[in-house]
């Protein structure tokens, strides 16, 4: 199981090499170094004490220690929160050959699409497989909403509603539908803006020059900024889905 609290389980006196060698068994030093290199710990960085490492580096190390053990079931809870674009790609590459069961909870669509073979929908107290990708799911929700609206026309209510209400309800329903549609459009516009912002930050976080700065503050600030945008993106996406239920 991988979640952000695992960073607290790292021994700050360790180096990436010593932490991995502790669980690496008979693996050679070169095998350990090559594996760590895939998670961004290259050259002398693999031998440095991890206490002053950034949150992103510690997250990568915690994940590397987990992936090395190749468990039968791997649960990933928002694994890319502290990872830059390059490391997210490394994570996906490390997970693709994984032969065990993999359950991913993530707002990172690209990661999900790269490593997940199937999707399951949890809805109305039921869990069922979904045949399609994330875009198919969004389209399916839109189709469901349209079908529900078509079945719930004001004419149906007229059968039981008084005449005076008959004149009011269509306007109220239309007004409500208009507000919901406007909110959906607002969310979709903001989601598009957030995606562009996340992509821009990912590009900045993927620049090696950012981590060559002896002052970790700029990288940490960009990481926090990305986390904030990602959290907003997740909340809006959940609201978008709820409006289509």
Image: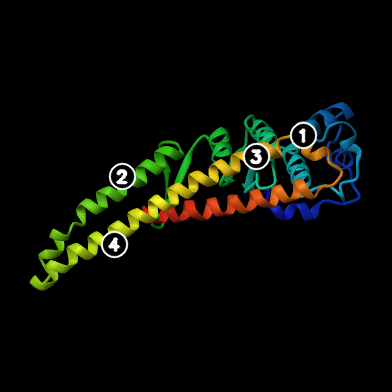
Locate residue 229, reporting x and y percent. Answer: 59, 51
Q: Is residue 74 above or below residue 11?
A: above
Residue located at (16% from left, 68% from top): 168
Q: Which mark lies nearer to you, 1 or 2? A: 1
Q: To which residue does mark 3 refer?
A: 202
Residue located at (60% from left, 39% from top): 199
Locate residue 205, reporting x and y percent. Answer: 70, 40
Left or right position of 231 against 62: left
Q: Secondary structure at mark 4?
A: helix
Locate residue 77, reporting x and y percent. Answer: 62, 49
Q: To which residue does mark 4 refer?
A: 176
- Give whichever of discs 1 and 2 has the lower sequence position: 2
The answer to whether the residues at label 4 and label 1 have Cβ atoms under 8 Å apart is: no
- Give whichever of discs 4 and 1 has the lower sequence position: 4
The answer to whether the residues at label 3 and label 4 have Cβ atoms under 8 Å apart is: no
- Give whichever of discs 2 and 4 has the lower sequence position: 2
Residue count near mark 2 (Cα–Cα under 10 Å), binned few <14, some 14–19, many ≥20: few
Distance (Cα) linking label 4 and label 1: 50 Å
Q: Based on the displayed image, in which of its 4 quarters is residue 139 positioned?
A: top left
Distance (Cα) linking label 2 and label 3: 33 Å
Could you say which disc has been placed on residue 208 in the image?
Answer: 1
Residue located at (23% from left, 62% from top): 173
Q: Secondary structure at mark 1?
A: loop
Locate residue 212, reporting x and y percent. Answer: 83, 38
The answer to whether the residues at label 1 and label 3 have Cβ atoms under 8 Å apart is: no
Question: Looking at the image, which is closer to me, 102 or 156?
Answer: 156
Could you say which disc has been placed on residue 143 in the image?
Answer: 2
Residue count near mark 3 (Cα–Cα under 10 Å), binned few <14, some 14–19, many ≥20: some
Question: Looking at the image, which is closer to me, 233 or 35?
Answer: 233
Left or right position of 152 against 104: left
Residue count near mark 1 (Cα–Cα under 10 Å), binned few <14, some 14–19, many ≥20: few
């Amino acid at each position: 199981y991988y979640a952000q609290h695992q960073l607290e389980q790292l021994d700050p006196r360790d180096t990436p090499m010593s932490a991995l060698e502790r669980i690496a068994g008979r693996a050679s030093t070169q095998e350990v170094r090559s594996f760590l290199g895939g998670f961004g710990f290259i050259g002398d960085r693999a031998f440095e004490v991890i206490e002053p490492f950034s949150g992103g580096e510690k997250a990568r190390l915690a994940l590397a220690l987990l992936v090395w053990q190749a468990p039968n079931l791997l649960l990933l809870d928002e694994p890319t929160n502290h990872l830059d674009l390059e490391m997210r790609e490394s994570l996906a590459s490390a997970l693709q050959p994984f032969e065990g069961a993999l359950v991913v909870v993530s707002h990172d669509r690209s990661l999900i699409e790269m490593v997940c073979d199937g999707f399951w929908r949890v809805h109305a107290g039921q869990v069922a497989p979904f045949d399609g990708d994330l875009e198919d799911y969004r389209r399916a929700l839109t189709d469901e909403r349209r079908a529900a609206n078509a079945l719930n026309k004001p004419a149906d209510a007229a059968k039981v509603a008084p005449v005076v209400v008959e004149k009011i309800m269509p306007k109220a329903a239309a007004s409500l539908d208009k507000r919901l549609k406007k909110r959906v459009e607002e969310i979709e516009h903001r989601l598009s803006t957030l995606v562009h912002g996340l992509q821009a930050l990912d590009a900045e976080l993927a620049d090696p020059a950012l981590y060559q700065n002896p002052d970790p503050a700029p990288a940490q600030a960009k990481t926090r900024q990305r986390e904030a945008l990602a959290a907003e993106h997740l909340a809006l996406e959940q609201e978008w889905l709820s409006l289509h239920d």
